[in-house]
Amino acid sequence: MQPLPDVVLFVSVDDAGAGPLAAAILNARTPVGLVGRSGGTAPADAVWPAVAQELIRLGAGTHVPAEVTDQDVARAYVVVTLGNPETCPVLPRTLYLDWSFPGVESAMYAPMVERILPLLERHVTTLIGTVLQRTGGD
């Protein structure tokens, strides 16, 4: 039996913008054994159209915003909050990070997605290295 992958959970309020984008970037770049997921504390009905287009470009397909649960957090090796750490359940033995980006709370129209994408890419690249270092991965 193969070990379960280490889950990185990206938590935002609406799960309609930066969270799904960060998860898609991680999944596109990560080595085997690390999986990105996202969730929201008050999920929207759908992702922003510009985010949906970028998710397709990244090979992630479609995303339906979902509410983050205590079980989601319990399964995660790392929880990354996107400017809302106070709304996320906190459990022991989980690494928590908060990535705050100015304007992330605002609408994710194409110019915002274009602006935040390079920031998310840099943060995700650093995060992959941190997780691999902590877990002894390659």
Image: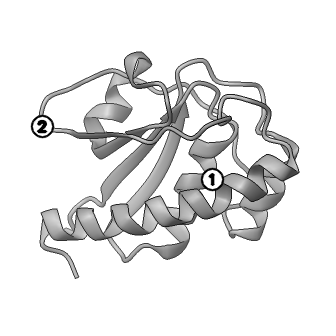
Q: Is residue 121 above or below residue 23?
A: below
Q: Secondary structure at mark 2?
A: loop
Q: Closer to the camera, 102 or 11?
A: 102
What number of labels is visible?
A: 2
Q: Nearer the viewer, residue 39 or 123?
A: 123
Query: Which residue is identified by label 1?
Result: 21
Spot occupied by residue 59 in the image (x, y as percentages of width and height)? 69, 69
Q: Residues within 10 Å of mark 1 (few under 14, many from 20)?
A: many
Task: List x then y, in percent, for residue 101.
Answer: 56, 41
At 47% from the left and 25% from the top, the residue drawn is 84
Quadrant of residue 123 in the image?
bottom left
Q: Which residue is mark 2?
A: 93
Q: Is residue 131 left or right of residue 87?
A: left
Give SS at disc 1: helix
Q: Measured along the vertical axis of the image, is residue 118 above or below residue 9? A: below
Q: Amino acid at mark 1?
A: Leu
Q: Residue at x 45, y 62 (%)?
A: 124
Name the kind of residue labelled 2 in the image.
Arg
